[in-house]
Image (spheres, rainbow, N blue to C red):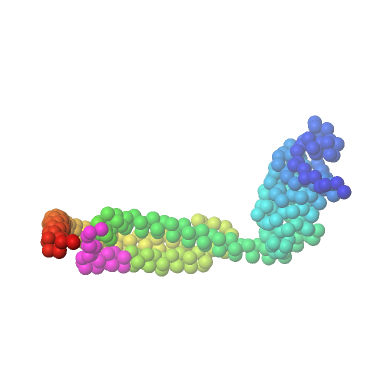
Amino acid sequence: MSALTLVSLTEEWIIKKVGLKRQRVGDVRSLSIPGNHKEKIGYLGNGLDNFERLKSLNLSHNSLVCIEGLQCLQHLQSLNLYYNCIPSLEEVGVLFELPLLRYLDLRLNPLGKSDPYYRPFVVYNMISLRNLDGCPVKEDERKSAKRKYSQQRSRDNRQALLDHLNMKLSLMNEANLIRLNHFAANHRSPTYLSSHQKPLTKPAALAQAENKLAQAENKQQASYRKPLQELLDIMDKHWVGENSLELNTNFLTQIVQILCMMENHITSQDAEVKTLKEEMGELCNFANVQEKEHKAEVDKFMADLEELNAQLRIAMEENVALRKDLLKSQKLQHKRQWRSNLSLAPPKV
């Protein structure tokens, strides 16, 4: 049994496979290249780029995972991808660029198992489609798909607006508080001094100011929630799944009012932020003075300690000298005792 060969599609391979002449490639209207047990197409590449007028294409029974390259067939009306290896709807997105496609067969592809509800998605995104997987696309089915995915698009637009507003509000919040954070970062007391020093206790007033600053940040962030909710509610009220809200005067008026309210609210908080900044500056200066005083005390303590160490070294050297003298005296005493004992001993007969 011969091994299966996966082919990378090229124009030369198509010409040889189907028996076309090169000068007729641009005039081909129909092309059928189904796979078999010996040879299957695994990759399209740009092999179909010059088949500009192709209207019908059969690529069934192949091993295609990606169908990138079919979007160049702008006149294509019928496409057979039966029994391939297309894994998900993400790969089918290139077909949405084919404005005249009417007949599409995606049966026996893995996407049918990974997303069994892919049919309404394809019907919604391909307005010209008349037949999908051998079944006609009815008007009721198209309306149902439109309702389903219009609501999904509305949710996506709402989330996109929320993300956009959150980003803007985050930048505004950062712009208002960046100087305070700069103060906090540059004047923060060190946790530890040297190995011989004890930690510097943070002044109570400075700790209170930092707490106030944190409360102001939380208050400012919390103040964004209500306008954001109002914006989302207005979107839900006016968005019907089609047309643009940019032309809705009532919607734009309400949006502008809410944004102005947010701007006024942020402006009103600038005075509080400025006051906290000044308090933080004064307290940081006070903390710096305390830190310098503490450092002076530590330096004095270290100098006294060095002096005591010097005195201890002298005392230890004197102690060693005294021990040496004591040992010498003990040796001399033993020697004298030994001689005395010899002199008192009786003479030998």
Tell me which residue sits at (72%, 54%) in the image.
Answer: 86
309 left or right of 85 in image: left
Work out which residue is located at the far top of the displayed protein and give it. 23
Q: Which residues are magenta?
A: 195-216
Residue drawn where x is 68% and y is 57% of the image: 88
Which quadrant holds residue 268? bottom left
Residue closest to the eye, 221 or 201: 201
Work out which residue is located at the far right of the displayed protein and give it: 1
Residue 180's x, y, as percent?
28, 57
Residue 212 in magenta stretch: yes
Question: Where residue 59 appears, x then y in whole percent?
Answer: 79, 48
**Residue at coordinates 41% horizontally, 67% vertically from top-left?**
225
- In the rendered view, would you say 264 is above or below 91? below
At x 12%, y 63%, the residue is 344
Q: Quadrant of the C terminus?
A: bottom left
Residue 336 position, x and y percent, is 12, 59
Left or right position of 247 against 209: right
From the viewer's perspective, tell me whether residue 280 is left or right of residue 160. left
Query: Above or below — where is 231 with respect to 71?
Result: below
Q: Work out whether residue 210 can be spotted.
A: yes
**Foreground pick, 317 / 341:** 341
The answer to whether residue 119 is visible is no
